[in-house]
Image: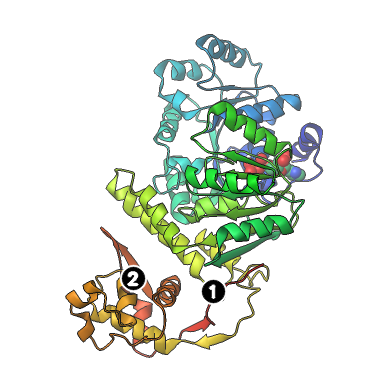
Amino acid sequence: MEQARQMLQHHFGYDSFRTGQAQIIEQTLSGQSSLCVMPTGGGKSICYQIPALMLDGLTIVISPLISLMQDQVESLRAANIPAAYINSTLSAQEVDETMQLASGGYLKLLYIAPERLESATFLQALSQLYVPLLAVDEAHCISQWGHDFRPSYRAIQKLFTLWAQQPTVLALTATATPAVCEDIRQLLSIDEKATLITGFERENLAFTVLIGENKERYIKNYIEKNKSEVGIIYAATRKSVDALYDLLTRAGVSVAKYHAGLSENLRMAEQERFLKDEARIMIATNAFGMGIDKSNVRFVIHYQMPRNMESYYQEAGRAGRDGLPSACILLYASGDVQTQRFLIEQTRDEARIAQELEKLQTMVDYCHTEGCLQNAILTYFGEQPGAPCKRCSNCQDNREVKDVTEDAQKVLACVVRMGQKFGKTMVAQVLIGSKNQKVLEFGFSRLSTYGILKGQSSKEVSNFIEFLIAEGLLAVKHGTFPTIYVSEEGKSVLLGKRTVMRKQAVTVRLL
Ligand code: ADP
C-alpha cells in the first residue's frame, strides 16, 4: 500500500486516502472483485485509477455518460496518466487509432460506453488485449431494481467469457439500496463479503422539508437572503424550469438553465456559465448534474420532489462537496406527487410502473416523516441510523409533541369501514363529513365514522393521513389509482396497543 500512497501523492497531489479508498484499492490489487458504495464526491474514481496505474495491462472502465468520460480522461491526461475513451462521438478511424494505442500498451485506462459492447467486432478487438481490471462506474445501472436501469449495462457480462483470465471487477455506485447491491453482486459475480459501503451520512448537509410554502416566494426570499451563494434548483419538468428561469431573471438574479429540451450547444454553454461561477444559480431538471464536480454549491432546492429517494439523495448531495455546511431544501406540495405519477406512468412496462410507484411512495413518506431526515435517508439505503443529526428541519423543530392516538384510531377505523378500497382524499372527505356527491353515492354518510373529524379541513386531514402513511400505520396499494389500507402496525393502534405521537399542526414558516 505504500506504493499506492505514493501514487496518490505523485499523480493526484493528495496526502492521505479517504474512508474506504485504501481498503478497496487493496482488495482490487489482490485480485478480489468488489462492490464499492460511496456517496457522490466520496472519491470513487481513485479507487480504480490507482490500481490501473499499478497493474500491468489495461484497465477498462464502463461509464454511462459521454461527458463524464471526457472529463475524466482530460483530467487523467493532465495528471500525466495515459487514458482514452471510446464512445459514439468518435469516428471509426478514431476508434481504430485508440485500439491501436491500447494494444501497443500505450494506455493505462480505457473508458468505454456500454453500448459498444454490443458490437461483436469491437469485442473481438478487446479480446486481444490484456485486461487485469474492469471498473463498472454507476453500477446501479445494471440492476432492474435501480432507479436508472440501462439495458446496455447487461452487455458487460459478455466480458466475462472474453479472456482466458477473467479481470478483477470493481463495481462502483453512489446510490444502491440493499436489493440493488445484491443484484449488482449477482450479475457481476462479486462476493457479498467484498462489499464496502462507506458512510452515507454527510455531516455538512442540513436537510429541510417544507410543506405548503408559497414556493416562488420562498425561493426568491431564500436567494435574496443568501446573496453570494451558489446553488442548484431542481424542478420536475422543463416547463417549471423555464418558468423559474424567467421569474428569477426578472428579479435580476444571475441564473442558468438546463434541460433536455435545450440544444446540446446551449446546454453546454449554460453548464459552463454555472461551473465558472458566471451564473450563480442553476435551474435544471434531473438531466443536469451527473459527473458535475462543482465543490462550492451551498444549497440545492427541490422546487418539486423527485420521483425517488435515490434521485433525491444524488441531487441533494451535489451540495457541499467541499465539506462546508450546505442546505438541501425540498419544497413539498401534494400536487407534485401527481406530476411524478404522471411521468412514471408514461412508461409502458407495467411491472416497472408498479415498482416506480412504490419508490415514489417512499419519497412521499420522507416528506411527511417527523423523525430525523438524515436518519430516514440512511435507513432507506440500508445503513444503521445513528443519533438524530440535529441539523435537519425535523431535528430543529421544537414544536411540542402531542398524543394523537385517538385521531389516528378514528382515521384507521374509517379506512376499515370504507372497505380499504379508497384513496386518501375520499377517506378525508368522509372523515370531515363532506356532502360530496361521491360520498353520498357510496352511502358513506351512514358510516359511524362519517364526520368524526368535523371541524378540520380536508387538507389537514389529508396531511394527517400522509403522516400515518409515513409512520407505517397505513399503507398504500398502487392500482389504477392509489388506495390505502391499515398495516399490521396500524392494527395495533386500533387495538389500543400502541400510541401515536405527532408534532403539533404544521405551521407555514415564512422567511
Ligand atoms: P465520486 O466519483 O465518488 O463522486 P470523485 O472520484 O469524482 O468522486 O472525487 C470527488 C473529489 O474528491 C475529486 O475532486 C477528487 O479529486 C477528490 N478526492 C478523491 N480522493 C481524495 C483524497 N484521498 N484526498 C483528497 N481529495 C480526494
Q: What's the residue at 41%, 53% (across, down)? A: 339
Is 373 placed above or below 7 here? below
Circle 2 Cα neighbour tier, 10 Å, few/some/many (<14 / 14–19 / ≥20):
some
Indicate the amino acid at tag 1: Glu
Q: Is residue 395 left or right of residue 119?
A: right
Q: Is residue 109 left or right of residue 150?
A: right
**Quick one: quadrant of the N terminus?**
top right
Q: Which quadrant is home to the C terminus?
A: bottom right
The residue indicated by pointer 2 is 425
Instruction: Say which residue appears at 69% left-offset and 35% top-offset.
Output: 273
Q: Circle 1 — which element? A: loop
Which comes before the other along the chain, label 1 or label 2?
Answer: 1
Name the mark on residue 370.
1
Q: Amino acid at mark 2?
A: Thr
Q: What residue is shown at x 34% (from left), y 45% (from top)?
A: 346
Q: Residue 465's x, y, as percent?
A: 40, 75
